[in-house]
Amino acid sequence: MMAVVMERRVVAVMYVLFVSLVLHTEDGACQHFYLLRPVPSDSLPVVELKEDPDPALDPRERDLNETELRSVMGDDLDSRFLSVTPPPKEREDDVHTDSSFPDGPMPAHIRALDLDTPPFVLAGARRRKAGRKLKRRLQMWLWARSACPVSYTWTDLGSRFWPRYARVGRCRNERSCSVPEGMMCAPAGSSRVTLLRWRCARRKGNLKCGWIQVQYPIITECKCACSS
């Protein structure tokens, strides 16, 4: 009997939450209300690679000596994000970093929710202090709803990069990350890995090519942000 009452109260709180937020949020507005929407973050564009298809600009077999290239890279070769050989095909479970519950500490704006104040308590309604379990369940639901994990997949950068394979991050956007809906997960942080880029240039009519070190951005953090 107590379990049934508990479930009904959870449903009631969820209903009040949605109704209150919809009534108090302007259409098209992109802002958090009652601290339920994470603070928007600026987008982080990822460099789009465009290659000249001319095969004369590709490195030859002798230019791909692994021993020599490893010597050039030294300690900059980050095996977490770079691979010389094709990585094993990842299972669907391994591609994403998220699980049933988000990792790390609970965000402060969710941890600070007060279920004994609006919008959880309607004006004039009889107040009853929310139990600890109810508050925890609602917090966990909001946390899972607004979480923005990074998904990683191995990408073939082509023969003009060494190592050729990079573990690229992206933000998942299968659904909105805010309550009410409207905001989406967007890049919020990145790190840069060093790799070699095959570069060709014409000098005095001759084509000169060689390896140069470049910085490649890898998305490492996503946050709930206003959709552009």
Image (cartoon, rainbow, N blue to C red):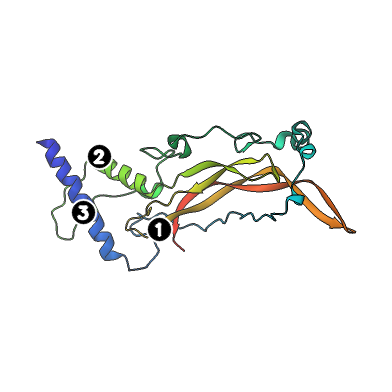
Crowdedness of circle 2 by 10 Å Cα count: few (<14), some, many (20+)? few
Measured along the vertical axis of the image, is residue 104 above or below residue 172?
above
Q: Amino acid at mark 3?
A: Tyr
Residue toward you, 90 or 124: 90
**Residue at the (44%, 37%) spot, across then down:** 92
Give the residue number, with chain letter if any, for mark 1: 183
Q: Viewer-nearest of labels 1 and 3?
A: 1
Sequence-first tag of 1 and 3: 3
Give the residue number, with chain letter if any, for mark 2: 132
**Residue sitting at the far front:** 55
- For the N terminus, the image quarter is top left
Give the residue number, with chain letter if any, for mark 3: 15
- Hey, which quadrant is residue 73 in on the image? top right
Spot occupied by residue 10 in the image (x, y as percentages of width and height) = 20, 45
Crowdedness of circle 1 by 10 Å Cα count: few (<14), some, many (20+)? many
Answer whether labels 2 and 1 touch (C-beta < 8 Å). Answer: no
